[in-house]
Image (spheres, rainbow, N blue to C red):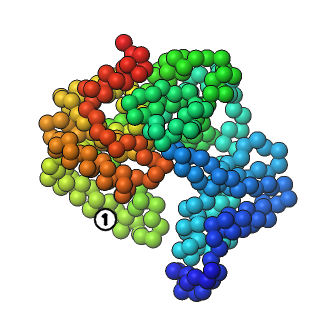
Amino acid sequence: MESVCPKTGDNYVLLDFKQFCEEIRNQVEGKLGEECEASIRSVVKNNHTEQTSITIRVGETNVMPAIYLEAFYREYKQGTALNEIVSNVVEIYEKNRNPWPNGLDFSFEGVRDKISFRLVNCKKNSEQLMNMPHVDFDEWAICFECVLTREGGSVGAVRIENSMMREWNIGLQELVRLASENMPRLIPPKVEPIEEVLAGILIARLIEDDGITEDEREEKTKEILDHILDRKEDAGIPMYVLSNCLNHYGACAILDIPFMDSVRERLKEDFYILPSSIHELILIPVSAAPGEDRMLEMVQEVNENEVPEDEFLSDGIYRYGTLRKKICAALAIE
């Protein structure tokens, strides 16, 4: 199919996604040499969504980074050249080809202090949950992962499956106990006013923008901070974002009962929990909250228009006082 490049205005033949993936695979193998073996794979992600990745092996290594190709295809359709995309894929591979130079110990003793929680939608993950240890919790499922620190300090996570639990010869309650102990240390929870979170996102984008000068960056940063301060003063509904230090499956922070109780003490009252995604939740003090029907509309509108399918958690709203009892019952906390 012939198309017009948005960047140059030139005509070119647009590859469909399957052809694009195969061409990327061929060019990556050509760029990395004879020892390179690249494969295109379909990966089932959260909420039974599928993504396509290229996995790259060079030599005898057992570590094969998976690089997802959908975003690259969107860039390609906007006119980014294939050779530029291939270079970016190879650069990502080179940065992640050996994240654990000393190897990984997946024995129980090797991972017991790395086990933590994940929180997902139960219905949308019903097939995956058949192969994963989990605790049913309202419309959610409490799952488990190993949080692994890579060379250089970045963090990755590997979900725990039934086969791993059988190999370790442990039960579900042991996983719950370890995750409850480890999570506050591995991925500490955090609560921030929503205005500060938005400011952080905008400033991070400025830092990554190579198209502006340092003076322009400083000026725009000041404008953002001034605007956020004005919004805080004029805000009608105080909202807070609950997540963890990695912003990775941060909704599981609600399982840290001591931390959640400290939030309630800080707010001096109960609060509503509005699921924003698997990565964060919105908290609204009860005294400042609009009606529950309005909050339900807010959650559903955001889920429908803003949240990617693989990050969806729930369309419901919850009050912490009630939810706390359910969490304690699910995790058998006294």
Taking the view exactly as shown, the residue that stands out farthest to the right is: 34
Circle 1 packing at 10 Å, graded few (<14), some (14-19), many (20+), is few
Q: How many tags in the picture?
A: 1
Which quadrant of the rendered structure holds the N terminus? bottom right
Residue 147 image-quadrant placement? top right
Disc 1 on helix, strand or loop? helix
Residue drawn at (67%, 28%), measured in percent from left and top?
163
Residue 31 in view, yes or no: no
* Position of residue 35 measured from the top left corner of the image (x, y, whole percent): 84, 54
State left or right for residue 308 relative to residue 276.
right
For residue 230, above or below residue 11: above
Task: Please tell me which residue lies in front, 117 or 203.
Answer: 117
Q: Write the residue at 54% across / 86% down.
A: 9
Quarter that holds the C terminus: top left
> Between 79 and 300, which is closer to the camera in this rendering?
300
**Seen from this angle, which residue lies furthest bottom?**
10
x, y percent for residue 139: 40, 34
Q: Is residue 1 above or below residue 34?
A: below
User: Residue visible at 38% across and 30% down?
Assistant: 138
Direction from residue 62 to residue 233 in the image, left or right: left
As drawn, 56 above or below 26: above
- Pointer 1 residue: 219
Residue 315: x, y in percent?
Answer: 34, 44
Evaluate whether residue 277 shows in this view: yes
Query: Is 288 left or right of 159, judged from the image as shown?
Result: left
Point out residue 162 in the picture as x, y percentages from the top left corner.
Answer: 62, 27
Amino acid type, callout 1 = Glu
Residue at 20% across, 47% down: 294
